[in-house]
Every structure is written in structure tokens, then in C-alpha cells.
Image (cartoon, rainbow, N blue to C red):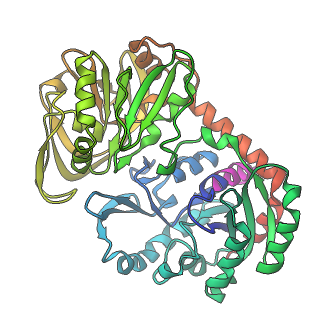
Amino acid sequence: MGALMLQGTGSDVGKSVLVAGLCRALSNRGLRVLPFKPQNMSNNAAVTVDGGEIGRAQALQALACRVDPHSDMNPVLLKPQADHTSQLIVHGQVRGTLGTGNFRRARAPLLPDVLASYRRLRAACDIVVVEGAGSPAEINLRAGDIANMGFARAAGVPVVLVGDIDRGGVIAAVVGTRTVIDPQDAAMIRGFIINKFRGDPALFSDGYAQTESLSGWRGFGIVPWLPAAARLPSEDAVILERGQPISGHARLIACPILPHISNFDDLDPLKLEPAVRLLMVPPGQAIPADAALIILPGSKATIGDLHALRREGWDIDILAHHRRGGAILGLCGGYQMLGRTVGDPLGLEGPPASVAGLGLLNIETRLSPAKTLKRVAGTALGADFTGYEMHMGETSGTDAECPFASLADGRPDGAVSPCGRVMGSYVHGLLASAGMRRALLERLGATSSGADYDVSVDHALDAIAAELEDHLDIDALMAMAQDAS
């Protein structure tokens, strides 16, 4: 059938959610649908069926399509590091690093890789739904672009522009985009969507008509605020400080927001648990003394985030929490931080260094170039789980001889301290397994709701798809997709 691409008037206008919703809506119509994002920048990633990694949003969009995530769905992924560089992932595998000085020069040669992935997807389905990055209005980034109009024009994919009315100025954002971009780029745009509308859409009928008149583009609809989007896995760091509302006698679980926090969607399943309150602790605030559990999350720069943790005084909070008998769980980079040392002799995260960890686990970590990317299953705390590994480094020590988990392939994972209150694991996605979540909460004296996280996400996708069916002209979008070359 073809393809269509959603680009935004700016970042965080809701492109990822709209693509996921469209993917599910089209899948519900019986079409074979696949998602695609040429270039993404995110430290939240997922492991693919072909042993690579892609942005978390594209993995969610694959779920919306009812298919396994594949590295072709996000052929170029940039993962920011502590030294102002980004790890470059191409077709799911590490290809080196890019700095601010060479990023623009290096991205244009990646266009053939991007187009090769897109063409493979296009040949395997009825329709590809493509997500842009940032905005085509960032004309200072147009030269060498592979994420927005550079891709759209090279692949011949028609574009729909998404504007966020919740932030205000949406008419100017849509019309202004047409004003500043190249006329040939503007010719790729076939219309716009107004997103995140609160209230009665009829109140914007005049504004909608004026946007059509001034831009010369047709509107495909006004999408209301989508409460179900809050039940989807998190990708962007802008959501980190929202936390959960306080309820009754809920047990407090605290997680510090480290500068290079990654895969923080590991914590999302806790939102299903009325018996706990998840608090993401921002810089400048202490970790509350009444926390029942502190979770140290994944990190794209373990050494850099260890330094940041100490600058914030969070190391003092964590050690005091431990002395009071509190529990601590480290995930991936957070697991490495709990040990005695983290060594980076090859300078993979910055200048070569070896730094002291928190010393709560008798383990040592040595970072290495080889990256473990693997889907896993296993047992921990007496419960079964599924998840994935995504890390660079080897960890060993006497506490690792008492592993946190036993993996189905026979390998041990992680470590547990002799007191049993400090635990670490390399597995992401542990808490999505209801049994694993129940076992952890029982250790905190809390009762789990037993809710199935995967079912919750699936129901949210269906709810969003239903809203899009009601508020967008999906038939017109499908007809437009047939114009893809």
C-alpha cells in the first residue's frame, strides 16, 4: 500500500504516541503494519528479535503492530554519554561514537543504511508508519538531515505535520513551519494534525479553518488529550518528575534521577501498584528517609553518574538508608554502582578511569567494548521473569557467588549482599513480570495488585487507537500513504 510519516512542529508534540496509536488502529483493520524511525536519540532502548537494540518508542510501536521489534525499525540510534559524545548504534549494533564536532558530517553518510532498512520493511508489510525526530522547522539542522525531510524526500514518503495545542501557539507553529522550510520540503507535507486538545474541539473550529487557509495544508483531525498514554512505557526524560500520587499507607520507592539515566521505563510497572508510591527524586532534593526501597536505575555513563550521585549527596542518603535497614535494588548501571569499583581502562565512557562505587556489594566491574544484547528469562526471589540484557562490562566478586537470578540459559545474574537487603541485576524489564513484582513488594511488607503490565499496555494501545478512529480521517491518511514512491 505505501507509507506515511508524522513529523512535528517541535519536540514532545506527541509523535511517538500518535504513531503507536495509528499502528494499532491500522492493525485492527487487518493491515500488516510496521513502524519506522530513521534516527532516534534516546538512552531508553529495547533489545530486538535479531539481537540488536532500538529506541524504546519503536519497540512499543512494534507491539502496537503486534510484531516483534527489529533493528530495521530504528536503523540509527544515538545514545548520549557523559563526555558530550553519543554512542552510535547502526542496525542495532555499536558502530562507534559521535561528538558535537562531527555529528553533522557523519550523519549524511548514514542515509543509505536508513533507506536499506526502510525498503526491507516496506517490502514486508502493507503500510509503514514513520516517525520523524524533532522538527523540520529546525532548518539549521537541515543539511545532511536523515531524520525528517532528508529521509522523506529520499524515500518519497508523504508527511503529516503534528502540532501540540496544549503548549499554545499551534497555529503559528504549523503556519510558521511552512514559512521557514524549503519549498521542496514543504511540498512533501500533505496536511496537519492538531494534538493534545483539552475540551470541546468545536471551540477550535475557527482556528482549525484558519490554519488550513494560512498553511495551504488540509487538516486530518483534532486529537484530544489521551489519558491512556500515561499507561504506555516511558521514553522521554520529561516525564521523570511526575511520579505517582500519594495514597494512604503506600510504601515509598525512591529512584534518583541521574544525568544519564537509561531504561527508566523499568519502573513503569510500579505505577500499577496502589500499595506503593514511586518517587523520582530530582537533583537538588534528598532521597526521603522513609523510603522502603531505593532503586538505582540504568545509566549510559556509570562513572559520570557516580560522580553526579556524590555531588548531590545521594551517596550519603543511600548509605544512611542501608544503615537503617532499608532495601536497595540496582539495575544494570545501578548494579555496577553498588560495587567496590567501576573501571574503564579503555576510556569507553570518557577518559580512562577507575572510581570507587558505593561499596554495598562486594563486586568489581570492568567496562569493555563488547556489548551484551540478549532477551532473557529466569527466576529470582522465587518468581519467574522475562526481560533483556543491555550492558557493556563484566562484573565479578564474592557477592556475585550469591546471584540475584538464575537465567534460563544456565547463567547466574547479579548479586545479593550477605544481609540480603542489597540486590543487583543486569536484567531490564524485571518488574513487568507480575510474579516478580509481587515477590519484591512482599519483601517491603506490601501487597501487589497482581495486575498484568503487558495487558495494561495493550489495552492502552487499543484505547488510543479507538480515539484516533473517532477523531482522525484515517481513510484519508491511508489514501495519502498510497502516494509513497
Which x, y percent locates residue 315?
A: 23, 35
Q: Does the magenta stretch include residue 268?
A: no
Report the side of 262 relative to 145 (left or right).
left
Report the side of 167 relative to 440 (left or right).
right
Q: In this view, which residue lies farthest toward the bottom?
A: 183
Residue span colored magenta: 19-32
**109 lies above or below 423:** below
Q: In which quarter of the image is residue 453?
A: top right
Report the side of 258 relative to 392 (left or right).
right
Q: Is residue 22 magenta?
A: yes
At 51% from the left edge and 13% from the top edge, which residue is drawn?
Answer: 447
Tell me which secondary structure the magenta stretch mostly adopts: helix
Q: Specify whether residue 29 is in view.
A: no
At 19% from the left edge and 59% from the top edge, which residue is drawn?
Answer: 350
Quadrant where the N terminus is found in the figure: bottom right
**220 lies above or below 139:** above
Which x, y percent locates residue 236?
A: 50, 51
Comparing 366 with 309, the one in front is 309
Quadrant where the C terminus is found in the figure: bottom right
Q: Quadrant of residue 366?
A: top left
Which x, y percent locates residue 279?
A: 45, 32
